[in-house]
Image: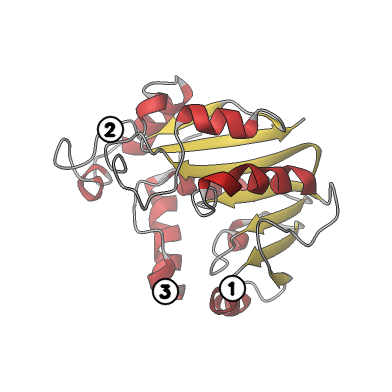
Amino acid sequence: MAVTPAFVRRLTRKWMDHAPHLWWGDRLDARFVVADRLAALTGRRVLDVGCNAGVMLSELGAGSAAIGLDLSAQALELARKLVPSVPLVQGDMLALPFADGAFDAVIFCGMLEVPPHDRKSAAVAELARVLRRGGVAYITTPNRAHLRYRGNRRMLSVTYEELQTLLRPHFAAPIRGFDPFPPFPWFLPNRVLARIPGIWRLLDVLMRRGFGTRASCMFIVEAVRC
């Protein structure tokens, strides 16, 4: 089922009320898709790597045994106010302080673009290490080949082919593209697209049918641990 505009409005309001300076800043973002699916993770052991202000953790289903990890003490302080019952750990994605196979699911949204290119494989290996066999990693990351990011030397995101190479040793991972439209000024800005009735339904159809995957703005992966 596609993300609904009502869900996007509710989650955006939560961000704006809780930590507006840490919001991801786009009403058409693949992380809304992941957030919408978190309510189904009931009774699971879930790790949120880069949990930020705790908003994604707050969307998890009842009975989940969740843990949040972030490198920023300030972000964790905010997360404690939103999810006071969730254990929060200050730590590095490249050295996760958890046992092998400790989790059924790991949220890894907006994180793969953080480490330098020569450390990305180590980050993915750590992600895989703490997941049990058959566990799922929820991954979103920008597509460096998209016009919005192309030529930006500060952007440490990956291409479709690079993402395939990173995931293949550890995961069975069909890569989906999210938002295949070019950015403004070649097309409508996202703040306008987000107001178009049915836009989330359209994005869901395009994503599931694989339309423009390699040229999409973001990648979204539900990666099953092999």
Label total for image: 3
Q: For the residue labelled by badge 1, is the local secondary structure a helix, a strand or a loop?
A: helix
Q: Is residue 84 left or right of residue 50?
A: right
Q: Is residue 18 left or right of residue 37?
A: left
- Mark closest to the chain's N terminus, 1 or 2: 1
Q: Nearer the viewer, residue 76 or 114?
A: 114
Q: Nearer the viewer, residue 134 or 110?
A: 110
- Mark closest to the chain's N terminus, 2 or 3: 3
Residue 69: quarter of image: bottom right
User: Local crowd at mark 1 within 10 Å, few (<14), some, or many (≥20)?
Assistant: many
Location of residue 204 with respect to 54 vertically, above or below: above
Reading the image, the residue beneath label 2 is 181
- Mark closest to the chain's N terminus, 1 or 3: 3
Q: Are marks 1 and 2 in contact (CB under 8 Å)?
A: no
User: Local crowd at mark 3 within 10 Å, few (<14), some, or many (≥20)?
Assistant: few
Point 51% across, 37% down: residue: 220
Q: CA distance from mark 1 to mark 3?
A: 13 Å
Q: Indicate the position of residue 181 as horizontal and vertical percent values.
A: 27, 32
Here the colouring is secondary structure
Point 35% across, 30% down: residue: 202
Q: Amino acid at mark 1?
A: Ala
Q: CA distance from mark 2 to mark 3?
A: 30 Å
Q: Which mark is residue 17?
A: 3
